[in-house]
Structure formats: structure tokens, C-alpha cells
Amino acid sequence: EAKAQGKGRRVTYEPALDQHSAEQARTAADLRVALDTGQLRVYYQPIVRLSDARTVAVEALVRWQHPQRGMIRPDLFIPAAERTGLIVPVGQWVLAEVCRQAARWRDELGADALRYVSVNVSPRQLRESGFAAQVQATLAAAGLHPRHLTVEVTETAVFDGGSGLEELRQLKRLGVNVALDDFGTGHSSLGLLRTCPVDVLKVDKSFIDNITDQGEHSVIAEALIGISDGLRLRAVAEGVETEAQAEVLRRLGYRYAQGYHFGRPMPADQLPAHVRATAAAVS
Ligand code: C2E
Ligand code: MG
Ligand code: MG
Ligand code: MG
């Protein structure tokens, strides 16, 4: 919120801002229809072990298959959904779909083929009272063990107060894993890592982009793997696009990564072949 409405926007921009919110209202109304008529899709992106590029987990990423506009990426509709509250039913749909899919893959690939499926949870969803209980019910309905699910939240979502932190603690007690997404870009403090029950740190792409350059560009990525190791968290480097970046990450001590270099988000039906191929390349 602070980012979107901060310094850059002043009085002179108000008309544009109005237009913007009218547009968001329209998007939200369309999205309601999309949800009710089955236009949403979930894609899955590999999370790999850097030592051998084997896919060990996946992140679920929602898409909107619009009848006229084609495939719409979440950056174009999640903010509107968040503002209007529609993210709550959308997020619940995604969660249920992901849990059912993860249970199918467990049966198809074996329980340990994928350690977990990760799902993004927005601030509004997390703060919705009874969120953890709803996750528990959804897991039970799908017959999925909580350890096969990871929820990805941002620092800001947890830090902004409300019941977010309590919901996370409850999820942890159930056995669900917690990941801090886009780590390092939010406005929290490192102290959050002590109060928040975290398993996974997802190091934001912005800290990975320049790590192959000369000089100081890998300093933050290096500091974050140090913190992560010290606190016994698993670090996942986000947005890895080249083998050169993967090599620097290995040298820094990173064990897990995600990015176009290893695999793009794909429809569920393509994932088993992908997982088997990366496993076969290893053994
Ligand atoms: P995120 O959770 O940080 O997800 C990673 C984003 O980076 C994804 O974009 C992914 O496709 C993209 N990405 C992965 N590897 C690379 C790479 O090597 N290069 C580049 N340039 N990009 C890469 P996507 O799918 O467009 O999602 C954008 C954001 O939308 C997500 O960021 C997440 O914050 C949000 N989102 C996606 N699905 C959901 C959902 O089901 N619920 C909620 N609340 N938010 C979602
Ligand atoms: Mg994420
Ligand atoms: Mg991320
Ligand atoms: Mg990100």
C-alpha cells in the first residue's frame, strides 16, 4: 500500500488514481465471473536442488484464461482482488485446487517426489479470521498431509499487525511449512525472523539479477544465505535465469533455486514428465 500510494503520487495524479480504481472495480467484477465460470488456472513452477537441478518442490501460480484477452498474469488482477476482498474466495479456490493436485501427484509420483507444493497467500487472506482452520479443513478434504503444503507470505503481510502472525503460528502447529516470499523487499526488520515461524526464505529476484557482475552485487545474496543458514532456514533463490547465476549461488552456499533457467511455470499435466526427467538425469 505504502509503495503504491507513496511519494510518487500527488494531488495532480488524483484523476488517474480514480480511473485506476474504477478499472480495478471492473477487473474485480470480471474476476468474480471468471471464478464462477472456471476461467482460473493454476500453473506450477519447479523449485530445484542446485547441486543436480532436480525438481524437489513446486510453486503454484494462478492464471486467468480470459475468453477475449487470453492468458492474464496475476500481477494484472491480484492487486484488484486484494483491494476488493475478492482475493479471499479466489485464494480459497486456488488452495483447494492445489491441495487436490498435490494429493494426485503424491499418488502418481510417490510421496517424496515433491517435498511440497507452495501456494501464495495474500495479506488480506492471511488476516481473515479462521484462515488456518480453513487450510486445515481444505487439507483434510483433499487427504493431503500438512507437511506437503507450504504457504508463501510476504514480510509486510506478517508485519502489518492484525492476526496474521497468529494464523501462521497455528499453521505451523498443524505442520504446514511457512515461506517468506520476496524476502528483503518488504518493510520489516530482521527481527521478524525470530518472532515469525519461518521454514523457507525466498530471496527476491532483485538480489539475484546482478550477482554475476563484478564487485559488490552479490553481497546481499551472500548475507541472506548466511542469515538463513544461521537460523537453520532453507533459502530459495528466486528468478534464476542463467547457469552463470546458478554457479555463483552454488559457490555462495545456496542449495535451492527457482527460475526460468530451470523451468517456467507450466500446467499441472506437464509436471510429472518434467519431474521424472530431472530425476532420471540425476540417477
Ligand atoms: P511470486 O510469488 O514472487 O512468484 C514468482 C514470480 O516470478 C512468478 O510470476 C513467476 O512466473 C516469476 N518468475 C519465476 N522465475 C522467473 C525468472 O527466472 N525470471 C522472471 N522474470 N520471472 C520469473 P507470476 O506467475 O506472474 O506471479 C506474480 C506474482 O503474483 C507472484 O509473485 C505472487 O506474488 C502473485 N501470485 C501468483 N499466484 C498467486 C495466488 O494464487 N495468490 C496470490 N495471493 N498471489 C499470487
Ligand atoms: Mg511466491
Ligand atoms: Mg516470490
Ligand atoms: Mg518475487
Image: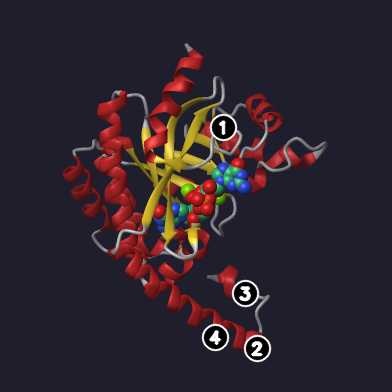
Q: Is mark 2 within 8 Å of ligand 1?
A: no
Q: CA distance from mark 3 to mark 2?
A: 12 Å
Q: Residue at x 29, y 40 (%)?
A: 101
Q: CA distance from mark 2 to mark 1?
A: 45 Å
Residue wearing tag 1: 262
Q: Earlier in the sequence, mark 1 or mark 3?
A: 3
Q: Earlier in the sequence, mark 3 or mark 2?
A: 3
Q: Are marks 1 and 4 in contact (CB under 8 Å)?
A: no
Q: Are marks 3 and 2 in contact (CB under 8 Å)?
A: no
Q: Earlier in the sequence, mark 4 or mark 3?
A: 3
| Image position, residue 8 (x, y; %) | 68, 75
Q: Are marks 2 and 1 in contact (CB under 8 Å)?
A: no
Return the mark for residue 18. Answer: 4
Q: CA distance from mark 1 to mark 4?
A: 41 Å
Amino acid type shown at disc 4: Asp
Q: Please name whichever residue, 153 or 196, is drawn nearer the observer in this view of the structure.
A: 153
Q: Please name whichever residue, 65 or 142, is drawn nearer the observer in this view of the structure.
A: 65
